[in-house]
Amino acid sequence: DSITDWSGLEVNKSKLWQKQLHLYEVPFYYIEYGMAQLGAIAVWRNFKNDPAKGLQSYMNALKLGYTHSIPEIYAADIKFDFSTSNIKTLMNFVKEELEKI
């Protein structure tokens, strides 16, 4: 926010994240967003590497809908893996794609 003058109130500003009620009412809300984003990046990467196979894998995952667990849905040729190394791989992919723009 470039309009509000927070001079002398920096400590207060640093605590504003607590106003986000989602953190208390539905604590896994943002975790789900993160999981979905990582999955979407992996699907995008698969499509970029092999469009036909990537699209087919995505369609296979969509067909599962709410009938399978998240790890099973992720089995559509992407990893249900939130390790540092896998996230780094996905970050590098996004970085390379952004550099092409």
Image: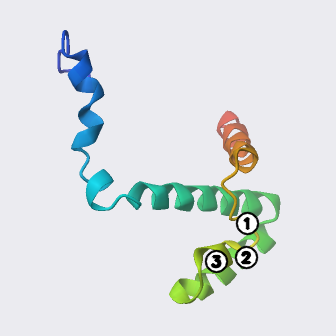
Amino acid type at mark 2: Ser
Amino acid type at mark 1: Ile
Do the residues under discs 1 and 3 have CB atoms within 8 angstroms? no
Q: Is residue 95 above or below residue 2?
A: below
Give the CA separation, mark 1 to mark 2. Answer: 9 Å
Q: Is residue 1 visible?
A: no
Q: Badge 3: few (under 14), some or many (20 or more) residues near its Cα, within 10 Å?
A: many
Residue nearest the observer in this picture, 76 or 100:
76
Do the residues under discs 1 and 2 have CB atoms within 8 angstroms? yes
* Outermost residue to the top: 8
Where residue 73 is drawn, which disc sits there?
A: 3
Dot 2 or dot 3: first in sequence order is: 2
Where residue 86 is drawn, which disc sits there?
A: none
Give the CA separation, mark 1 to mark 3. Answer: 9 Å
SS for dot 2: helix
> How many dots with numbers?
3
Residue depicted at 19% across the width and 10% down the height: 7
SS for dot 1: loop
Say which residue label 1 marks: 78
Q: Is residue 67 above or below residue 44?
A: below
Q: Badge 1: few (under 14), some or many (20 or more) residues near its Cα, within 10 Å?
A: many
Say which residue label 2 marks: 57
Q: Residue 23 placed where, x, y %?
A: 32, 52
Q: Residue 21 placed where, x, y %?
A: 24, 52
Query: Which mark lies nearer to you, 1 or 2?
Result: 1
Specify the quadrant that holds the C terminus. top right
